[in-house]
Image (cartoon, rainbow, N blue to C red):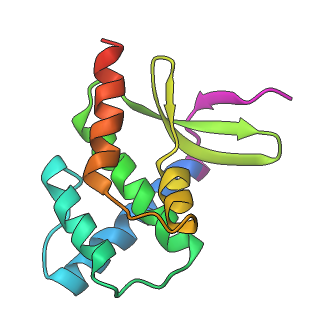
Amino acid sequence: EPMECIPIRLLEICEVNEAFEWVSSTIKKTLSKAFSGQEEDIEKLQALVTSGKLKDQPTTWESIGLALGVIMENEMDGMEWVTVIDGNKEYPALRFRDLLVNPAQSISSCVKQKQALDLKAEFDNVKSEVEKRL
C-alpha cells in the first residue's frame, strides 16, 4: 500500500502538542528558560540535548524532533503538519508542497546511528529545501 498524507488528525495534533509541552517544561526546569517555538529557541533545544540530563529513550528524541518541527512550522511559511499513513504506521510529519519532513524520525535515527545532533543544521537543511521550492 502506498504511503499517503492526509490533513493532520486530532491524534497526531495531540502527539505534537504533548511533545512540545514536555520539551517546553523540561527546558524551563533544566535551563530556567522559556521555550516558545521560535527560531531562537533552537539554541535552547540544543542546550537541552547536550546537557546530558535527558533519558536516552526513543520518546525523548521523538519529542525533541517534534518540537523542532513546531519551530519549522512557525518559521517557514506554507509548512504544515500532516498525518502520514504508511502501512500500519501513522505519524505526524511536515509538508511543504512536495517536500515531506519527519522531524521525529530524523532526530531519532541520528541518535540511533550515534551521530552528533545538530538541530540548527537540521533546521537550515529543511529551510534551504523549502527555499528551493519557492
Residue 9 in the magenta stretch? The answer is yes
**Which residues lie in the magenta part?**
1-11
Image-based side of 17 in relation to 113, left or right = left
Quarter holding the C terminus is: top left
Residue 78 in view: no
Q: Residue furthest top?
A: 134
Q: How many marks?
A: 0
Residue 49 in the magenta stretch? The answer is no
What's the residue at 63%, 47% (across, down)?
A: 91
What's the residue at 29%, 76% (across, down)?
A: 50
What's the residue at 64%, 37% (across, down)?
A: 84
What's the residue at 46%, 55% (across, down)?
A: 16
Q: Is residue 71 above or below residue 110?
A: above
Quarter holding the N terminus is: top right
Q: Where in the figure is residue 65, as x and y percent of width and height?
A: 43, 57
Image-based side of 68 in relation to 63, left or right = left
For residue 64, what is the image quadrant?
Answer: bottom left
Image-based side of 92 in relation to 26, left or right = right
For residue 8, what is the image quadrant?
Answer: top right
